[in-house]
Every structure is written in structure tokens, then in C-alpha cells.
Image (spheres, rainbow, N blue to C red):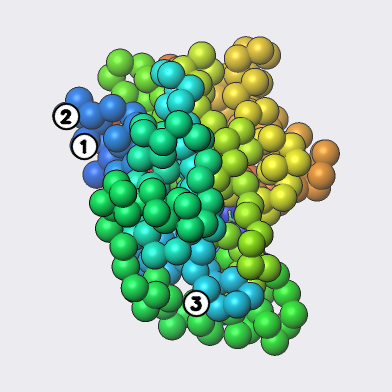
Amino acid sequence: MIHGGAGAIRDPSRYEASLRAIVESGASLLSQGSSALDAVTHCVALLEDDPLFNAGRGAVLNAEGEVLCDASIMDGRTLRAGAAAAIRGVRNPVRLAYEIMQRSGPVLLVGEGAERFARERRLAFESEDYFKTQERIAQLAKAKRRREIALDHSEAAEAKLGTVGAVARDRHGDLAAATSTGGVVNQRAGRVGDSPIIGAGTFADNASCAVSCTGVGEDFIRTSLACTASFFVEFRAMPAEEAAREAIRHLVAKVNGQGGLILVDRQGRCARAHSTPRMLTAAYVGGVARVDTP
Ligand code: ASP
């Protein structure tokens, strides 16, 4: 299952073809025997390459007009995790998160140190122009005029585009989750949201489920929301649908939080829930791709 962000998305049809193609591509990898980890990395990298979404190319701009990206990944089989925050120039931030998980020792690397590690691992870099689209430049100008710091999908934001994520279960029953974002429009330089925080924006544990979140990052950090959803499955024995719904209920009850999540459990049941007017998701279950944009 994949997502393209949550918010007040005015024209979801714009995103549907892309979400469908990407979830089908991930499903075909899984059917050829790829791991859940490889499938989520692949799907998130494709979402990063698509300028429609707020991650990688076409990510939102911060208050200084820069694209700084965050991403994370977690392996439900081993509970290993990798994350990168406030990075510049790395074409696919999720691939950097993957390399950090596999080889660095630390779970989270930030800024220049993370970029140096990406060079050591020979990951692809792109120029500033590759990441900055005209739509994003106009979106930041509008946010500045209105003096607002907005979720990409907020009512006020000019373009309706979103943070991305993926969760998967493979044929061995292993689970994985990944999330990638440019953050929120016009955010202060140095601000980091929930997307690279394991337990807040991303979590996976074979004992429960895999979760990827999107929304106002501070709300998800303060409620450790991805981990909370997983605990609902593991310790309260909730089925996927109920755990997703209860986690979002918890987010609203505790901090009046705005956002959504996707979740896949050990049985491969997929669920989504959101407190925003809409969320963009696509799931591939039982041989059929289903795109949901309400
Ligand atoms: N969660 C992201 C952040 O706060 C934003 C989003 O999901 O659109 O950085």
C-alpha cells in the first residue's frame, strides 16, 4: 500500500494514474519474490521521482526557498531502521535511508554528514534545479504573502501535492515501511517533521504491522503515532482497520492532530485512516490495485 499525502486535495484525479502505476510496479516486484524492504524502497523512490508529490523532485520549499528532504525506512523482521533528515541534492532520499539502515551503524544521519555518507555509498545526486519546480516556487511565494506555514495539502496551498510513503508484506510474511518528504511549505530552515523519526512517521514490526504517516509532523512526533498504531495491533489485538482508525482517533483526542496513515498487518490486511478531509492512497490486495482518494 502506498500514500501520496493527506489534506484538502482539490483535484485527486491528477494523482490517480501515478498512484496506480506505482502500486502495481511494487506488487509486481513482490510477486517476483522481492522482499518487502525492496518493494517499499522501490515505490517510494518512484514517488520521489514524480514531481506531483512532496518528496524528492518537486518537494516543497522551506522559508529560504530551498528543498531539504527527510526520509526513513524500517525492516519489520529485524527492527533495523535508517533515516536521513535535512539533506540536499540526494536524488532519492529513501535510498539514502536504506543505505543508512544497512551500513552506517547510526539510525539517523542529518545534513552534511548524511550527504557525505550518500557520496561514499555512490548514490545519485542532482542539481538544485532538478528538485525545484515552478509550481513549488509559486506555492512558496503565496505562503509567504499569506504569512503561513502550511501542509502541502492545506486548503490555502496553491498546489495540492503530498508527502509519500509505502508499507508492504512479502511472501515470507516480512513487513517493511518507508516515508519521504520535503516537509511543510515555508517551514523554518532546520525544522524536521515526523517523516524521518522512527516510531512517529514510520514503524514496522513483524509482530504487529508496518505503518507510514503523513500530516502535521509535530502532532505525529508528540503522539509517537506510527508506534502507537503498531501497539494497538500487538497489545490490544486490533485488526488492521480498527488499529488505523483508533490511532487517528488518538491523534485527534490528544493533540487535535491533522493527518493520516497507511498500515499493513501480519495477515496482509491493508488499512488507512485520516483526520484531514482527504488522503491519497493505493493498495494492491488479492491481485487487484485499488486507488482511494476521498
Ligand atoms: N509529515 C510531514 C512533515 O511534517 C509533512 C506531510 O506529511 O505532508 O514534515
53 above or below 81?
A: below
Image x and y of residue 171, in percent: 28, 19
Residue 244 percent across, percent down from the top left: 61, 32
Residue type at the position of mark 2 = Gln
Dot 1: within a 10 Å radius of its alpha carbon, few (fewer than 14), some, or many (20 or more) residues?
some
Query: Is residue 103 left or right of 195 when viewed as pictured?
Result: left
Residue sitting at x 70%, y 42%: 221
Residue type at numbered disc 1: Ser
Q: Where is residue 140 in the image (x, y as percent from the top left)?
A: 59, 79
Mark identifier at residue 28: 1
Q: Which amino acid does label 3 sit on?
A: Arg
> Residue at (32%, 54%) from the top-left corner?
119
Q: Do the residues labelled 1 and 2 touch (CB within 8 Å)?
A: yes
Residue found 63% across the figure and 29% down from its top: 227
Return the disc, 3 or 2, that comes first in the chain's sequence: 2
Location of residue 43 by image quarter: top left
Label 3: how many Cα within 10 Å (few below 14, some 14–19, many 20+): many
Question: Label 2: which residue?
Answer: 32
Residue beneath disc 3:
136
